[in-house]
Image (cartoon, helix red, strand yellow):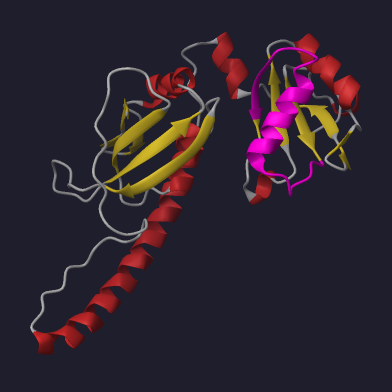
Amino acid sequence: MSSSAGDHGTQPNNTLYINNLNDKVNKEELRHQLFALFTTYGKVIDVVAQKGAKMRGQAFLVFSDLAGATAAMRACEGMVFYDKPMRIHYAKSKSYATLRREDPNFIPPVAAAVHNATLASDKRAREDDMNVDERASKKEKADDEDGEEMEIEDDEEGGSKQAVPPAVSLPSARLLCTNLPQEVTDDVLSVLFQQYQGFQSTHVVPAPQPNAAGQKVKMAQVLFDSPELATVAKEALDGFTLKKGWIMSVAYI
């Protein structure tokens, strides 16, 4: 990221890129404190601060207009924040939040990222399945003498099958995603939902029943800050094709 339009050719826009942040601070606390600080310079519509290794010590701050972003950058560049001086620049491109404001039908171009993450997860899942088969074979031999029938549970996401939460018609801050392929993980699903303002977390678990084709599937709960913010994500991603032949359903719970 560049430090200014003049120094590195980055065009001024509503989104600021902030780095040199204290990466020991809790993510939610960091988001709230950045919002509280920068909202004095203009209307802040999104604060993105992720925990991933590549995003440590960094954040994106989205203003509703350029004037607020510019005023904040000039006033806060070098300001000591949690014992470290902030480095603030215009972001290289408009944020997804800004693009959504300009075009309500805008959908983040994350399909490629989801595809790549899915492939990687699929490879890990196949390796895990091989390990499960080896463990199962050994346990079957050990149980033969007892005459016990062994049932292999899919414990990849923490254990027993989960009941499907009932869907509700009224907007809710919690969403239920169904018909997810086996290789989908929290990381894969977060690639999709973290593009939307107010995203908090995903929790992927095995679904209690196979799909209509008899395939094992997963489901997930996705939490947002409010029903209004969850609705934006639901409307954009209900029916999203995770991979060929797999269409995700998103409902309120």
Residue 202: x, y in percent?
A: 44, 41
Residue displayed at 48% across by 33% down: 193
Task: Specify the quadrant of the image occupied by residue 73.
Answer: top right
Q: Residue at x 37, y 58 (%)?
A: 158
When asked about the image quadrant of residue 45, the answer is top right
What residue is drawn where x is 62% and y is 48%?
52
Residue 230 as seen in the image, left or right of residue 128 = right
Q: Residue 21: image x %, image y %? A: 79, 41
- Asked if the stretch drawn in magenta spans residue 98, the answer is no
Q: Quadrant of the N terminus?
A: top right
Q: Is residue 47 left or right of residue 161?
A: right
Magenta run includes residue 34 = yes
Task: Confirm whether residue 228 shows in the render.
Answer: yes
Quick one: 11 or 125, which is closer to the camera?
125
Q: From this view, report whether residue 25 is shown above or below residue 62.
A: below
In the image, which residues are magenta? 20-47
Residue 38: where, in percent of width, then height? 77, 21
Say whether residue 101 is left or right of residue 70: left
Regarding residue 92, the answer to whether it shows in the image is no
Q: Nearer the viewer, residue 96 or 112?
A: 96
Q: Which image quarter holds the C terminus?
A: top left
Q: Quadrant of residue 138?
A: bottom left
Image coordinates for residue 146, horizontal then vertical, percent: 11, 86
